[in-house]
Image (cartoon, rainbow, N blue to C red):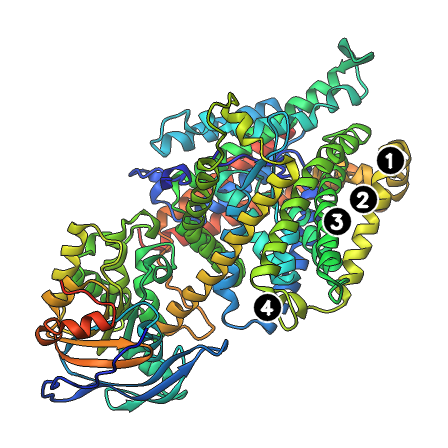
């Protein structure tokens, strides 16, 4: 299928400080499949950005690069620090990555242990770990679930706890993969309200165009390992040729 | 499938629920060792052990017969000990013929058989009570404190967490197999026959094996994703855990009391 | 349907204290070696892998297939775990599975858990891995064939060991328990073999890299071939001998001093053991006194701690 590549057709909003800078990132999987073909992206303090595009566009691969789980060619900078082997632990605390399937994200028997995992591995003292766990659970409005067993939670509850597991690390950037997938309408609504209220820079990959329209002022479109459009959500959603070319639908 | 099929914990506010999990694990183990130490036919000691169990049941607020009701689980294995009825020399009590062989039950054989059953039955009840009043994650913490190597407690923690996720996958696979076990319209084959049909036992085993293989690959890939999720939160090869439990006065007193009771039990069994 | 106890899980009460403790010692030493080996060779990725694999074995044990007459075949998994994860990791995974079955479901006892781990987790892994490793260079058909034999033998080894432990504990008569256990498990072992082979065939077809050169499965030393081979020989030769001539085995054990030791509980062992300069009654008085003092000391220590601790 031929795809027209439209780069930076829309004007990006002005920005104070950069939380995330990605410059010409390229990556191929060991089997030879090239997933990222020169991705460049900037996120400002306080930005809430949607990352859309068809399956296989490279969204998840890009996300795995943002805290160094995958290492391609090109630069990734978080809060002014260039990602390298030496500052990997610091970067991982700054980028809160929430995976799509909460059953992979929540790997501890209890909610408390899972939310405490990040702070504990940052080497924080016990009292600090405990207060961060409480604050993170408060932020996702799940304080009552502190001592619950992870497998007793509903999907929506698991998603919110999954977000708490990275909030407890007090990241500068929240990266979410498909947060609304598999949620019933009520759980989805709770999640949207939660994301809206969180005062934190976020990059959210999703197929949920209604969510994009409602929550994110800015949208980045990816396809075939490239950023094909980056701009105001209101303008991108009006550009039907662009949406059609990359298998997206207007909400 | 719902998780309740697996969870043996019963949420209640009771003395036993509040006890430190280390105490509960230790007392259970000492109780089971003590049962193994009691000589055959130590009826008073067995009775005393059962009274102790009764007390524990009452303290758990689960009802005095809670562990009793669930203790039949160990019964099928009793079959394996049945030979001692006939094999230990002693005064013959009764004999019968079966398959052309004469079986003679001796008093010594009966004594040993009943003693084995009682020991097993007492031990399994305490183990049942242990998981009924202790959440499994707390049990894992207790094992950590009791110096079980971290690598084992970690595997056990993962096993517990993903037990529910993977058995769910198994039931989905089994359901998919069932829903495709059909017969041609008009066929009069009953369901049990259909499920056993196909192309014989080898073919059915192959299907089961493929399911296991598929489950293996899914699990393998899942462990990759979990590893990524761990990396993303700062894991670098070493696992850190918090100690959520603290021994209180009552925990020490309870241990001392239980040890005294069990020692008394041994004394009764001997004299 | 959710959870059916397998006959190899011995409950508490069926093994004597001495047999249980000896099995615990053997198991603990082997696990100690497994832990130090895996810690050395452990990629950090191995921890979640072993954790999820333990859950996999647990769940895979629920996959069953109808055989005949209402019975069904299913998986124990020791051989399969060792073949795909390597022997040491396989042993740790099986240990976790058996521990959770005992702790959470009371399927298998706690004091006898050492024996259960030995029978179902350690010996099965050694046989499964050793035999499979011995044909690592061969064709797929040979590999699968050997895996099947190894899986069957691993179940037989577990059954044989279980029978021997029951007999040494004075719980079962050798002449009955061995043929009965081996007979039943010769059938159960067939199910194990069939599922193991088709699971491996599936893996070899879809992800051959997991079993090929450089995988965990190919890393362990060749000593395993010897270990697996020796245990298999032990099973192959002892089983027919024990079934055909239990009295012979009993005589051998008696001559070696196994039987008396296994059947009597330790309280009988200590008084039997008289020092030349001490009368029997004097010694038992001393031992009883020492134990009494130790227990009182432990109790007072606990009470003392309790008074200091926060209430």
Q: Kindly identify the residue that appears in the image at 80 percent across and 61 percent down.
A: C226
- Which quadrant holds residue A7? bottom left
Q: Chain of mark 4?
A: C
Residue behind mark 3: C149
Q: Residues within 10 Å of mark 3 (few under 14, many from 20)?
A: many
N-term mark: 1 or 4: 4
- Comparing C43 with C116, the one in front is C43
**Could you tell me which chain the residue with mark 3 belongs to?**
C
**Secondary structure of residue under mark 1:** helix
Could you tell me residue C34's position as x and y percent?
A: 64, 63
Mark with earlier residue (2, 3): 3
> Mark 2 and mark 3: span between their CA atoms?
56 Å
Name the N-terminal-most of marks 1 and 2: 1
Q: Is residue C121 visible?
A: no
x and y, in percent, of residue C142 in the image: 75, 57
Q: Secondary structure at mark 4?
A: helix
Q: Is residue A225 above or below residue B172?
A: below
Q: Are callouts 2 and 3 both on one chain?
A: yes
Secondary structure category for the residue under label 2? loop
What is the C-alpha distance between the residues marked 1 and 2?
Answer: 33 Å
Q: Earlier in the sequence, mark 4 or mark 2?
A: 4
Q: Is residue A36 visible?
A: yes
**Residue C48 appears left or right of B82:** left
> In the rendering, which numbered label is found on residue C209?
4
- SS label for mark 3: helix
Identify the residue under disc 2: C278
User: Which is more foreground, mark 4 or mark 2?
Assistant: 4
Lower sequence index among marks 1 and 3: 3
Which mark, by number, is residue C250?
A: 1
């Amino acid at each position: 299928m031929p795809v027209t590549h439209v780069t930076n057709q829309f004007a990006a909003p002005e920005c104070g400080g950069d939380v995330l800078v990605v410059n010409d990132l390229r990556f191929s999987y060991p089997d030879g499949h090239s997933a990222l073909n020169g991705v460049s992206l900037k996120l400002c303090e306080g930005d809430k950005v949607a990352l859309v595009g068809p399956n296989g566009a490279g969204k998840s691969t890009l996300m795995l690069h943002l805290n160094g789980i995958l290492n391609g060619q090109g630069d990734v900078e978080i809060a002014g620090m260039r990602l390298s082997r030496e500052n990997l632990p610091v970067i991982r605390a700054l980028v809160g990555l929430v995976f799509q399937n909460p059953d992979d994200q929540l790997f501890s028997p209890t909610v408390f242990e899972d939310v405490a995992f990040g702070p504990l591995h940052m080497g924080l003292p016990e009292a600090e770990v405990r207060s961060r766990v409480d604050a993170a659970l408060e932020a996702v409005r799940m304080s009552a679930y502190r001592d619950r067993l992870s497998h007793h939670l509903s999907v929506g509850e698991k998603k919110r706890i999954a977000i708490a597991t990275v909030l407890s690390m007090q990241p500068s950037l929240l990266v979410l993969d498909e947060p609304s997938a598999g949620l019933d309408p009520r759980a989805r609504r709770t999640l949207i309200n939660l994301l809206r209220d969180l005062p934190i820079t976020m990059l959210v990959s999703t197929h949920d165009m209604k969510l994009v329209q409602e929550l994110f002022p800015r949208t980045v479109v990816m396809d075939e390992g490239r950023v094909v459009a980056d701009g105001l959500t209101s303008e991108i959603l009006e550009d039907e040729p662009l949406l059609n070319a990359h298998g997206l639908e207007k909400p | 499938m719902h998780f309740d099929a697996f969870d043996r914990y019963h949420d209640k506010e009771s003395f036993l629920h509040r006890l430190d999990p280390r105490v509960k694990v230790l007392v259970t183990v000492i109780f089971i060792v003590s049962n193994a130490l009691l000589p055959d036919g130590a009826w008073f000691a067995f009775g005393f052990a059962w009274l102790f169990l009764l007390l524990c049941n009452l303290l758990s607020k689960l009802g005095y017969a809670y562990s009793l009701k669930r203790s039949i689980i160990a019964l099928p294995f009793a079959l394996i000990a049945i030979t001692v009825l006939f094999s230990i020399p002693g005064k013959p009590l009764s004999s019968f013929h079966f398959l052309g062989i004469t079986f003679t039950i001796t008093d010594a054989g009966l004594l040993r058989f009943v003693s084995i059953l009682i020991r097993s039955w007492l031990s399994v009840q305490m183990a049942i009570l242990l998981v009924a009043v202790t959440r499994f994650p707390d049990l894992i913490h207790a094992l950590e404190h009791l110096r079980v190597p971290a690598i084992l407690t970690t595997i056990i923690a993962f096993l517990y967490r993903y037990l529910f996720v993977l058995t769910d996958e198994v039931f989905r696979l089994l359901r998919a197999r069932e829903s495709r076990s059909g017969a041609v319209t008009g066929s009069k084959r009953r369901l049990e026959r259909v499920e056993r049909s196909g192309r014989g036992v080898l073919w059915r085993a192959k299907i089961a094996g493929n399911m296991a293989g598929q489950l293996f690959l899914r699990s393998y890939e899942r462990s990759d994703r979990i590893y990524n999720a761990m990396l993303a939160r700062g894991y670098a090869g070493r696992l850190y855990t918090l100690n959520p439990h603290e021994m209180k006065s009552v925990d020490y007193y309870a241990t001392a009391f239980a040890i005294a009771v069990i020692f008394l039990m041994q004394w009764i069994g001997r004299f | 349907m959710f959870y059916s106890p397998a006959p190899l899980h011995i409950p508490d009460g069926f093994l004597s204290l001495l047999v249980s403790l000896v099995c615990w010692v053997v198991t603990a030493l082997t696990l100690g070696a497994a832990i130090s080996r895996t810690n050395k060779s452990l990629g950090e990725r191995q921890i979640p892998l072993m954790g999820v694999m333990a859950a996999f074995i647990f769940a895979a044990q629920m996959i069953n297939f109808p055989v005949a007459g209402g019975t069904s075949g299913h998986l124990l998994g020791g051989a399969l775990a060792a073949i795909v994860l390597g022997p040491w990791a396989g042993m740790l995974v099986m240990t976790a599975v058996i521990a959770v079955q005992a702790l959470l479901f009371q399927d298998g006892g706690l004091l006898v858990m050492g024996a259960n781990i030995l029978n179902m987790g350690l010996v099965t892994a050694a046989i499964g891995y050793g035999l499979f490793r011995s044909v690592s260079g061969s064709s797929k058909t040979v590999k699968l064939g050997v895996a099947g034999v190894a899986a069957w033998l691993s179940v037989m080894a577990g059954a044989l060991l279980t029978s021997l432990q029951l007999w040494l504990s004075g719980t079962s008569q050798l002449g009955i328990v061995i043929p009965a256990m081996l007979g039943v498990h010769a059938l159960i072992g067939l199910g194990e073999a069939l599922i193991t082979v088709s699971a491996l065939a599936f893996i070899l077809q879809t992800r051959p890299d997991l079993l090929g050169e450089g995988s965990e499965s190919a890393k362990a030393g060749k000593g395993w071939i010897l270990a697996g081979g020796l245990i298999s020989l032990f099973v192959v030769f002892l089983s027919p001998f024990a079934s055909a001539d239990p009295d012979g085995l009993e005589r051998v054990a008696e001559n070696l001093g196994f039987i008396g030791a296994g059947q009597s509980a330790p309280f009988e062992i200590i008084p039997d053991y008289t020092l030349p300069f001490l009368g029997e009654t004097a010694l038992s008085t001393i031992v009883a006194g020492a134990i009494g003092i130790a227990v009182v000391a432990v109790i007072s220590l606990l009470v003392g701690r309790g008074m200091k601790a926060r209430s």
